Amino acid sequence: MNSKSIAIAGALLLSTSGLVLAAGTTIIPAGQSAQGGQTDTTEVAQAQSSEKTAQQETKAAPPPAQSEPASSGQNGDATAAADSQASEPAQSETAAAGGDVMKPDAHPSKDTVSEGNEVASVDDLGKATDSAGNPTYQISADGTADWYTWRGYKKYMANCMQCHGPDGLGSSFAPNLTESLQTLNYFDFAGIIVSGQQNKWNTSGNSVMPAWGEDPNVMCSLDPIYIYLRARADGVVGRGEPKRPKNNDTTKAAQQEEYNCLGF
Ligand code: HEC
C-alpha cells in the first residue's frame, strides 16, 4: 500500500469506528502534545486556522493507534477543548459571534454568498441554520466543530469520498464539491443527491452521479454532509477530520436521531 491508500484505509477505519465509539474517539493531531498543559487553546486555534497543510497531512491518516477511547484518560487537547466549551449555549454563542475563525474565504458557498454564514438559529439537537433556513456549521474559537459538521465529515468519508476524493476536493472522475457549492445552494445540492446527475459536469457521456434518494445511509445524513461541505467550501474547516465536539446530551440526541432514521 502506498501512503495514500493507507490514508484512505485509516480514514475508513475511523469512520466505521466512529459509529461505535461515538462518545470517545479523540485524535491527537501531530504537533499537539498528548500530555496536556503545554499547548494552550490559542495555539491550537491558530494552528488550525492558519496552516491547513501541515495539520492535514497527519490528520488525514491518523494511525488507528492514535485514536483512543475517552475513558483511557484525557489528553491536553481534549481537556482544553472541554474547558473552553463548558456548555452548549456557550458554544453556540461563540460560533454565532463569529470572529476570524468563522470568516469565510474569498470564494465561499453560494448560500454563504447570499445569506452570510452567521448562525440565525440552533434547534433542539444543536443543528444550526442561517437566516434563510439553510443548514450551516458552528465552529468555535478553538476550532472545535459542532456535531453536524463532524458527523457530515464521517458520512462524506463513508459515502462520497470514493468518487469525490478526500476532503471534498474532487478526483479525475467526480467534481470538487468545495467548488461545486459555489454555484449550488442547499436545495440544488439536496436535489442532486436525491435524484443523481448525469453528464453535466463531464459531458463525455458516462459521467454518473448515483441517485441516493432510496439510501438511508445518505438520506439520514443529507444535512450533516451539506454542512460539512459548506464549511469546506467556505474555508472554515481544513482538510482531514474536523475537531470533534465533546459529547453531551445534545450531541447524543442528534446521534440518536440519525440512528432512529436508520432504524437502529
Ligand atoms: C460512484 C461515484 C460517486 C459517488 C459515490 C458520489 N458521487 Fe457525486 N458525482 C459523481 C459524478 C461522476 C458526478 C458528475 C456527474 C455529471 O457529470 O453531471 C457527481 C456530481 C455530484 C454533484 C454535482 C456537482 C456539480 O458541480 O455538478 C454533487 C453535489 C455530488 N456529486 C455530491 C455527492 C455526494 C454528497 C455524495 C455522497 C453522498 C456523492 N456525490 C457520491 C460521482 C459520485
Image (cartoon, grey):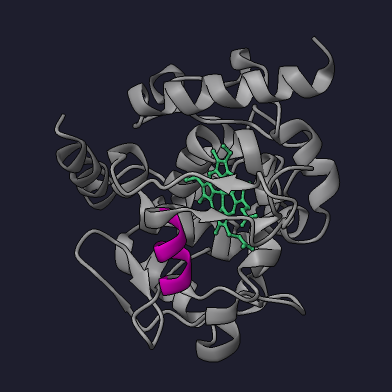
Residue positioned 82% across, 19% down in the render? 3
The majority secondary structure of the magenta stretch comes to helix
111 on left or right of 255: right
Q: Is residue 192 magenta?
A: yes
Q: Quadrant of the N terminus?
A: top right
**Relative to residue 79, is residue 97 depicted above or below?**
below
Q: Is residue 53 magenta?
A: no
Query: Considering depth in this image, is 148 or 33 the residue closer to the camera?
Result: 148
- The x, y position of residue 39, in whole percent, is 70, 44
Res. 155 visible in picture? yes
Residue positioned 62% across, 33% down in the render? 162
Q: Residue furthest front?
A: 205
Residue positioned 34% across, 31% down in the render? 23
**Relative to residue 262, is residue 188 depicted above or below?**
below
Query: Considering depth in this image, is 217 or 66 the residue closer to the camera?
Result: 217
- The x, y position of residue 12, in whole percent, is 56, 24
The quadrant holding residue 247 is top left
Query: Considering depth in this image, is 185 or 197 the residue closer to the camera?
Result: 197
78 on left or right of 195: right
155 on left or right of 105: left
**Relative to residue 251, is residue 15 depicted above or below?**
above
Q: Which residues are magenta?
A: 187-193
Q: Residue furthest top?
A: 1
- The x, y position of residue 254, in whole percent, is 25, 49
**Relative to residue 146, is residue 230 depicted above or below?**
below
